[in-house]
Image (tube, rainbow, N blue to C red):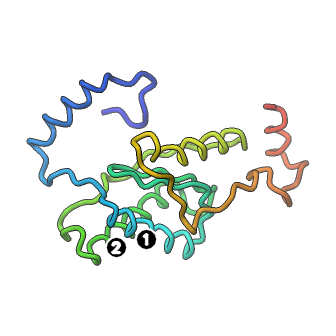
Amino acid sequence: MHYGRRRIQPPGRIVDEFYERAAAVLKFPLLELSVEDVAGVAEAFGEVVAERPYTCYACAIMPDHVHLVIRKHRDKAEEMIEILQQSSRLRLIRLGLRASDHPVWTRGGWHGFLDHPDEVRRKIAYVEGNPGHIGLPGQHWEYVKLYDGWPLHPGHSPNSPYARRLRGKG
């Protein structure tokens, strides 16, 4: 098993063949998120972002996966993923959009850490453009905040070791 994204991706036909073989042995059928499901997931994400509180810079809820850019927080990335998955799963069940015994998400998720504002801006652009890659309209969620240049945002000490290291990277 390989965790994360491989540098070289297999051709689409190989991926399609894998999904065909996997579908025959899965305990539950693969389900895509409908427009109604996406709205429920977005509501759940919004509640989590407000309650924790997380700073979310980008979010795309796709038919078969989601992308989020969330600022570093006291919760670890794995914890954030688990909280967001659980909250959205329970929301879909409450709305009658999923059976209570059907998993919505795979366990865990992929996460990466971005330590330079340029990397954060690139990832935000990628996430915001993701729906358009499959012909969906752009998504705009109330809980997504305009990027403020974190970690070098106004108020951050320009003389901190972190800021000096980032400036050294260019």
The percent position of residue 24, horizontal first and vertical second, equals: 8, 41
Q: Look at 84% across and 37% down and name the residue there.
A: 167
Q: Quadrant of residue 43?
A: bottom left
Determine which residue is flagged by label 1: 44
Q: Look at 47% across and 67% down and name the residue there.
A: 45
Q: Check disc 1: other Cα within 10 Å, few if <14, some if 14-19, many if 20+.
A: many
Q: Look at 15% across and 52% down and name the residue there.
A: 29
Determine which residue is flagged by label 2: 91
In the displayed structure, 101 sits above or below 131; it is below
Question: Dot 1 lies on which element?
Answer: helix
Between residues 27 and 13, which one lies in front from this camera angle?
13
The three-letter code of the residue at mark 1 reads Ala
Horizontal side of residue 147 vs 82, given as left or right: right
Mark 1–mark 2 distance (CA, rounded to whole Å):
6 Å
Question: Dot 2 lies on which element?
Answer: helix
Which of marks 2 and 1 precedes in the sequence?
1
The percent position of residue 84, horizontal first and vertical second, equals: 43, 64
The percent position of residue 10, horizontal first and vertical second, equals: 33, 23
